[in-house]
Image (spheres, grey):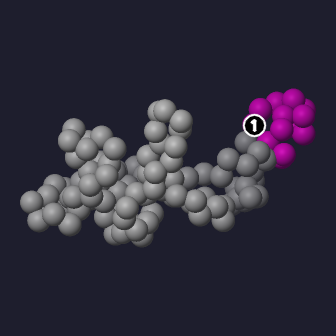
Amino acid sequence: WRGFGGGYPYVIFATKDDRRRDGWWSIEGYQYTAPTEEMSLPYRLYNLEDDEAERKNLADNLEHQDLLKQLIERVKWYASSENGWVKPQSNVPQTSANPRFHNWIWLPFLREGEEASQ
């Protein structure tokens, strides 16, 4: 099973690129096929054993509501701060971290209470 929740089936970080990342690409000719459903559905659920191409959304099917709720709760558990989740850190290089500014010694470069610049 594979589930999506919260609107878009992908996350947009610092980009205005709104192209769809879901859908299917063929092997022969590498042709893109967009999904038939809207991009902003609240939930998506696919049975990958029966529907490898993820063409039939089962999220609205009453038969699968318990499974959908179970998957949503699992994601919430993994994303909880009690479970150790932390906000992603910036991956921007910090020039003040360069050892050449510290007599070629690797050491903490932030003063207490200071935050790295973005």
Asked if residue 105 lies in the magenta stretch, the reply is yes
Q: Residue at x 58, y 59 (%)?
A: 19
- Residue 54 is a magenta residue: no
- The residue that disc 1 covers is 107
In the figure, is residue 81 to the left or right of 107?
A: left
- Farthest residue, direction front: 29
* Residue count near mark 1 (Cα–Cα under 10 Å), binned few <14, some 14–19, many ≥20: few
Q: Check disc 1 and report its element: helix, strand or loop.
A: loop
**Number of numbered discs on residues:** 1
- Considering every residue shown, the one lying at the far top of the view is 104
The residue segment tinted magenta is 95-107
Q: Quadrant of the N terminus?
A: top left
**x and y percent of residue 106 in the render?**
77, 32
Q: Position of residue 13 (x, y in %)?
A: 60, 59
Q: Which residue is at a point 36% across and 69% down the rendered structure image?
A: 41
Residue at the (52%, 43%) spot, across then down: 31
Label 1 is placed on what type of residue? Leu
Q: Quadrant of the C terminus?
A: bottom right
The answer to whether 45 is drawn above or below residue 30 in the figure is: below
